[in-house]
Image (tube, rainbow, N blue to C red):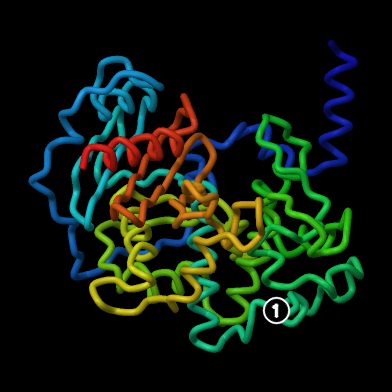
Amino acid sequence: MNRLIIILLILLSIEGCTTLKAIRHGSPSTDTYRNFDLDTIHGAESAQPLPESDDRYLSTAVFDGSQFHGETVGEYFGRARGNGSLLILRNDSILVEEYFGNVNRSTPVNIFSISKAITSLLCGIAIDEGYIESVADPVVKYMPELSDADPMFAKLTIEHLLDMRTGLDFKEEYGWNPFSKMAKLYYGDDVVNFISKAKFKEEPGTSHYYNSLSTAILGVVIERATGKQYAQYLEDKVWKPLGMEYDTYIALDSRKQHNAKAYGGIATTARNIAKIGSLYLNDGKYLGKQIVDTEWVNRSIHSHLGNEAYSYGWNNIITPDGDGMLITPRFFAIGLYGQVLFCDPEQNLIFVTLGEKKAYEYHIIFDDLCNLLKSRK
């Protein structure tokens, strides 16, 4: 035992305070954001609450099969999620709204990688406003210090970041390993310094490999291009225009460096997230106001990578019709522990679930429910 302690102390002395923080805080959870310095994305002064529908079918219907055992949708998620929430909308009106455990309507929950879809949204807005010229822009244009790092950075574009085709040597590892690169990214206090030390396993654009470091870089690019902090830009361009009801938080690498954890640091509510879904179901508009260009939305929710159904922070469920043609996909953003924002354009349905436990791939359940509702017509 003494030898193990000595080895651990030696490793910690080599790895530094980031590893100590990872050991102290452990694996991320839905309230881990409280362990970091935070910026606040304020809700709108004139908040616009979501209306409620008179359609009670989904709130009362009992389902069997798949993951259901003679129970309503709310009962299933109450059993599966522990502390969490379930929100289902059609035509921007609430069909089902349930909260479980210590979560309520105004409780911020860490949405983890759903944050990537929101960071992509900000990138689209920054392009609309001319801060970023094109997704073909090289990353070194906005982070010139990377010109002195790995030479492959010179070939890395913004679109490589959005499509996770960066070639970066970074393993997306969520098991409790305080010495992993993921732990160093998540608990590190200087993300730009971490990025500058990154290496490549292949040339950018070669293949798809999902990793949070890509979106971490994108977050820095957006802040550099706009000259605004992530939280302020998100508040001004999305939260206020969408009339968000509740304040949101985003974790920072440190108060000194002040870089937002754009890849997984947002903590917000189910109602706020549902409005992001509405924005994408309505071609980038909310209540008639264009928030982001329609073409950006189309590019985001229709993967252009063939069988790799991930694009610009979103995943697609692409279903062939009887003639083998691909029909309009359902799309979703997903985060650690089963945080899901799922959208069905054909039926104008939005599903959100947030919480601390993942009992199943919840986006598959939402896809099944969409099929049931479609067959019910």
Please name whichever residue, 162 or 255, is drawn nearer the observer in this view of the structure.
162
Percent coordinates x, y for residue 187 in the rendering: 66, 46
Identity of the residue furthest to the top in this view = 1
Please name whichever residue, 114 or 68, is drawn nearer the observer in this view of the structure.
68
Residue at 38%, 52% in the rendered image: 343
Residue at 66%, 59% in the rendered image: 305
Quadrant containing the N terminus in the rendered view: top right
Q: In the shown orientation, is residue 161 left or right of residue 278?
A: right
> Where, by quadrant of the figure, is residue 73 drawn?
top left
Identity of the residue furthest to the left in this view = 54
Percent coordinates x, y for residue 211 in the rendering: 69, 50
Q: In the shown orientation, is residue 29 left or right of residue 170?
A: left
Residue at 46%, 61% in the rendered image: 39
Residue at which label 1 appears: 136
Please name whichever residue, 142 or 22, is drawn nearer the observer in this view of the structure.
142
Amino acid at circle 1: Ala
Identity of the residue furthest to the front in this view = 323
Q: In the shown orientation, is residue 253 left or right of residue 231?
A: right
Could one spot residue 317 in this view of the protein? Answer: no
Percent coordinates x, y for residue 317 in the rendering: 50, 47
Residue at 83%, 20% in the rendered image: 5
Quadrant containing the C terminus in the rendered view: top left
Percent coordinates x, y for residue 181 in the rendering: 77, 44
Disc 1, SS = loop
Could one spot residue 176 in this view of the protein? Answer: yes
